[in-house]
């Protein structure tokens, strides 16, 4: 059985070395990011077998002419000088790599491979997810011991028609061995909250060893403290039968694409509806989805966020020394015993940073907790770095998270 393929194209500042396989091979051998097991040149394509964390991956590398497709999303901020250079570029290095069982680890490895082969990286066109990545961000991500956020594995596009209808669908999950996800018949007023549902489900499915079967209920969140959001996946061919053929995202839009393995997201509003297999549109929760639903983040993702926040903590503490900046930290509060489970005993919630002394943070709670009865907005406390899950820096110009600290180095 063939492994899913991830396609990226590296855009260098200078394309001179892209046509010399010996230079590329030398760079692949000299990096410490992975182990080169074997290589061969065949029909001007450099084939590499590389090993990382005990798993073997196959990659195919070749120079190619390119143009940036019109619908590709620019994921990062680029300085004008970089944008000008990217627009002038005509040749890039295609890096196609088979993904292994862990899609996020595979994605991280592909970024490391690209940085090893193209040290003067301007940008990366992630063809599988139809997005454009900053070369500065890719370099920083490749140097990190922590993988990027799962959302980088895919892109969710919102396509609107002449009416109010919006069709949300993903690109990139197929390289992870997952079906693409869709939400049909969204609207211009609701697609942002629907996107949160789609993104949360995509991230959860990326961690699932076994995917839920079609029509099987899957707990995703709480739309209120007492109302669970139970979703289910329906094949697109069945889903479009519930809507007009000429609707945006309907059967009429499937003749030339989006007609392979793709699933639409529906919901079960009650236990009775689950028993009967009677699913409903996500829109039945539109009002509640506007009121700060409780999306569940897995322990592994919480740990990943904590590790990245800790690795890049020096950026955070340095930013505190500039009085123009406002800093927020997300810390884990021990929840009340009645809400604790085997997998979760803390509520991770945002605090405003009041002071930093050494590795201690004095902070003020910015919102009401859900599961800590004796603590309220305005509560002040001290924390250590082990309690920090995430952080944000608000500069006079923009918001900066651990993911995009490359902006501080522009």
Image: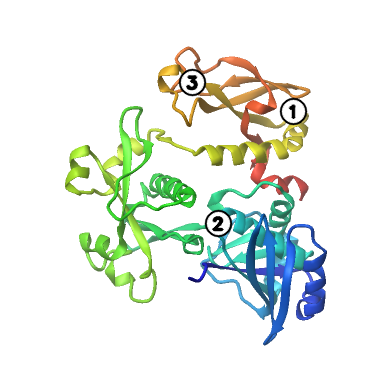
Q: Circle 3: is it few (<14), some (14-19), or many (20+) Cα within 10 Å? A: many
Q: Quadrant of residue 87?
A: bottom right
Mark 3: secondary structure: loop
Which comes sooner in the sequence, label 2 or label 3? 2
Farthest residue in the front direction?
Answer: 54
| Residue at (75% x, 24% y) in the render | 359
Labels 1 and 3 touching (C-beta < 8 A): no
- Name above or below for residue 86 compared with residue 326: below
Which comes sooner in the sequence, label 1 or label 3? 1
- Name above or below for residue 163 compared with residue 10: above
- Name above or below for residue 243 compared with residue 254: above
Q: In which quarter of the image is residue 79?
A: bottom right
Picture disc at residue 143: none
Residue 240, percent from left and from top: 26, 63
**Residue 121 in view (yes/no):** no
Whole-Å distance between the Cαs marked 1 and 2? 40 Å
Between 17 and 205, which is closer to the camera in this rendering?
205
Mark 1: secondary structure: loop
Labels 1 and 2 touching (C-beta < 8 A): no
Residue 98, percent from left and from top: 58, 67
Residue 88, percent from left and from top: 71, 73
Disc 3 target residue: 335
| Residue at (80% x, 67% y) in the render | 29
Disc 1 target residue: 323
Whole-Å distance between the Cαs marked 1 and 3? 33 Å
| Residue at (46% x, 51% y) in the render | 209
Residue 106, percent from left and from top: 60, 58
Disc 2 target residue: 103
Mark 2: secondary structure: helix
Q: Which of marks 1 and 3 is in front?
A: 3
**Residue 29 in view (yes/no):** yes
């Amino acid at each position: 059985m063939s492994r899913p393929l991830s396609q990226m194209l590296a855009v260098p500042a200078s394309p001179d070395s892209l046509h010399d396989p010996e230079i590329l091979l030398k760079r692949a051998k000299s990096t410490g990011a992975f182990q080169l097991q074997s290589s061969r040149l065949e029909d001007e394509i450099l084939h590499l077998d590389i090993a990382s964390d005990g798993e073997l991956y196959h990659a195919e590398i070749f120079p190619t002419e390119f143009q940036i497709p019109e619908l590709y999303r620019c994921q990062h901020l680029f300085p004008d000088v970089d944008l000008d250079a990217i627009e002038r570029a005509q040749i890039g290095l295609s890096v196609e790599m088979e993904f292994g069982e862990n899609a996020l680890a595979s994605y991280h490895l592909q970024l490391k491979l690209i940085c090893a082969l193209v040290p003067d990286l301007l940008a990366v066109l992630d063809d599988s997810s139809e997005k454009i990545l900053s070369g500065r961000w890719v370099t920083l991500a490749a140097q990190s011991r922590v993988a990027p956020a799962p959302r980088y594995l895919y892109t969710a596009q919102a396509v609107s028609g002449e009416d109010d209808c919006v069709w949300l669908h993903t690109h990139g999950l197929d390289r992870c061995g997952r079906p693409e996800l869709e939400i049909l018949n969204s609207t211009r007023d609701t697609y942002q909250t629907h996107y949160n549902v789609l993104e949360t489900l995509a991230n959860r499915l990326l961690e699932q060893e076994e995917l839920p079967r079609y029509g099987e209920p899957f707990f995703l969140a709480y739309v209120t403290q007492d109302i669970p959001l139970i979703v289910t996946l329906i094949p697109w061919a069945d889903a479009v039968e519930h809507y007009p053929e000429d609707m945006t995202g309907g059967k009429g839009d499937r003749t030339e694409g989006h007609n392979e393995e793709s699933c639409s997201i529906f919901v079960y509003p009650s236990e009775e509806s689950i028993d009967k297999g009677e699913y409903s549109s996500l829109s039945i929760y539109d009002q509640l989805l506007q009121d700060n639903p409780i999306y569940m983040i897995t322990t592994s993702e919480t740990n990943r966020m904590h590790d990245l926040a800790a690795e890049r903590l020096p950026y955070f503490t340095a930013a505190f020394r500039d009085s123009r900046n406002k800093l927020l930290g997300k810390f884990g509060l021990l929840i009340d015993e009645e809400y604790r489970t085997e997998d979760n005993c803390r509520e991770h919630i945002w605090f405003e940073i009041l002071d930093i002394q050494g590795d201690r943070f004095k902070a003020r709670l910015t919102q009401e907790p859900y599961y800590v009865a004796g603590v309220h907005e305005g509560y002040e406390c001290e924390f250590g770095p082990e309690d920090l899950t995430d952080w944000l820096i608000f500069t006079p110009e923009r918001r900066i998270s651990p993911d995009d600290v490359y902006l501080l180095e522009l």
